[in-house]
Image (cartoon, coloured by chain):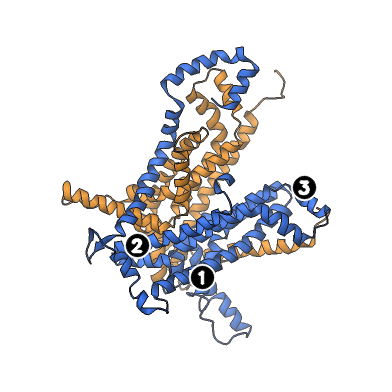
Chain colours: A orange, B blue
Amino acid sequence: MKEGRPRSFYVLAIFFAAYVLFLYGPMIAIYILSFQGPQGGLTFPMNGISTFWLAKLFEGTGIVDLGAAFRRSLLLGLVVMAVTVVLSVAAGMAFRRRFRAQSILFYSAIASLIVPSIITSLGISLEFRIVDDLIKRYFNENFETSMGLLTSGLGAHLTWTLPFGLLIMFAIFNRFDPRLEEAARDLGATPWQTFRHVVLPIILPSVIGIGLFGFTLSWDELARSSQAIGPVNTLPLDLQGLTTTVTKPDIYALGTVISAVSFAVITLALGTIHMLNKRQAAKGSDAGKGLV
Amino acid sequence: MDTSENILQQASPGFARGSDTARAAKAARLSPSFISWLQAGPMMLVFLAFFLIPLVFVVIVSFWDYNEYQLLPAFSGRGYTDTFEGCIAQLPDLCTIGKTYLKTLKLCFLVWAITLFIGFWVAYFLAFHVKSKTWQMGLSLLCTIPFWTSNVIRMIAWIPLLGRNGLVNSGLVKTGLINQPVEWLLYSEFSVVLALVHLFTFFMVVPIFNSMVRIDKSLIEAAYDAGATGFQTLVNVVIPLAKPGIVIGSIFVITIVMGDFITIGVMGGQQIAAAGKIIETRLNALQFPAAAANAVILLAITFLIITMMSRIVDIRKEL
């Protein structure tokens, strides 16, 4: 291409800026509006500035017990994160070798990603309903339900996070140099030692990425939770419920808090990834540094 | 044994022999395929238990009977006949379900066209005009951040802007362009499409950007050298090479919009009927077989679209 910036650069730069404004503008509006004064409403102009609505959220005086929902979502997110990391790394390792049924697993993951969430959610709820019926009939008449946060809910979230985890693992191992493992093996490392001391430290930054992806995907997940979570609600479900009834800025305050948690988790993870990359660069190789 | 090992073996047969025998002894204990099963098995089990079996249940239950209180495990087509009730009698007019699907397809098409347009140019800008890798990373991250926060929050974020007393309306009234606040800005098809575009353009940008950065820049230079105009280069070089990304992004956006019921519910003021909404409504009425029947229909349509699109490109090869 020619030297200097062509005219299309400026046109597209403006287009890009407009897109970013479109992305952020509305969200920034509600973050600002959640600091409305006690008399404030759902729209601009601001009616005073205070943390009234945020404080109200934490008092738990709202329509639903948001504190409990907050803890449930946090717990579920952390469990989903852990399971996603372990299962994705394991499956990612498996995909480096040919094995039977690998295309079944691959297509299951892709299908799980693109089958509309409500169908997955409905299927899981039907499955557990039928299991419940069987338990009631054959074992215990008073049995309530096996659906719950860490059974059907966890499963529903994993069908969303695992495909992402697997795809990220593919990307990682596309760039991975297998000669490093070769070297470790030749130095007498067992497969586990090779994984623990060579492979894992190298892929760790991306694995943290998978964890953070898993957490935030679960933390914000709504469509798959809607039918499959059982008798309790997660925070996004409560938030969705509030959209039809609430006319006060506390819904914005809740939005701000949920966003703040997402952003905190991401900043933390990005920071850790950055630190690990720096450490790797510093300690990883002493090539070219001479003998002493 | 993988290829690099073979090469090593050929290059220095004496060197690798020792470790090779040790490995052979180990292989006798755990065969590689067994290890692969061990590694991939847990994920496969999760998909089996929470995705594949549930899908089978959706299909089975769609043929069950039901009454007001419970599921009746007996074969029946009631889920489907209830769905299409009165459709034949009403011909040539479309019945409710037909209209609903038509509306869903219309929303889907609108959102697809808009997200494709925005996504393509945003990706194009990032891939071809932003030269420094750091800037490219930074700007991509900028586009990704909103995706990390709850969809519902990003939906309700439109209320202060589009509402009856929102910024847009009060701005328009103040400038004298309109006398009365416009009502169709919020809780309308307009707001649904706007919110869907706002939420899901990201799914278009990422795959298109991915296939664009892989394009060899010298191809574009060659096109210019051969006398192609910018437009000709775009149509004959960039778009064909970015096609895989375009198709993958399109599949994401289309399947999401086809099954969406939350955005359509919240932004449509629970007034707009769509395929996903039917399922939700049936579920709220505890008519599980009817919900399942609708899910099967939705699934069939979605698969039809995906099959048509994946004919254009081999998804597996692109990942």
* Quarter of image, res B288: bottom left
Q: Residue at x 71, y 62 (%)?
A: A12
Where residue A247 sits in the image (x, y, percent)?
A: 42, 72
Question: Circle 2 sits on which residue?
Answer: B293
Where residue B228 sits in the image (x, y, percent)?
A: 80, 58
Where residue B193 sits in the image (x, y, percent)?
A: 53, 69
Q: Chain of mark 1?
A: B
Residue flagged by tag 3: what amino acid is it? Ser
Residue flagged by tag 1: what amino acid is it? Lys
Q: Are marks 1 and 2 on the same chain?
A: yes
- Crowd class of label 2 (few under 14; some 14 to 19; many from 20; radius 10 Å): many
How far apart are labels 1 and 2 at the CA level? 22 Å
The residue nearer to you, when weighing A81 against A95, is A95
- Which of the two discs, 1 and 3, labels the residue nearer the N terminus? 1
Is residue B61 in view from this perspective? yes
Count of marks placed on residues: 3
Secondary structure at numbered mark 1: helix
- Crowd class of label 3 (few under 14; some 14 to 19; many from 20; radius 10 Å): few
Secondary structure at numbered mark 2: helix
Q: Residue at x 46, y 21 (%)?
A: B27
Question: Circle 1 sits on which residue?
Answer: B106
Question: Circle 3 sits on which residue?
Answer: B218
The residue nearer to you, when weighing A23 against B251, is B251
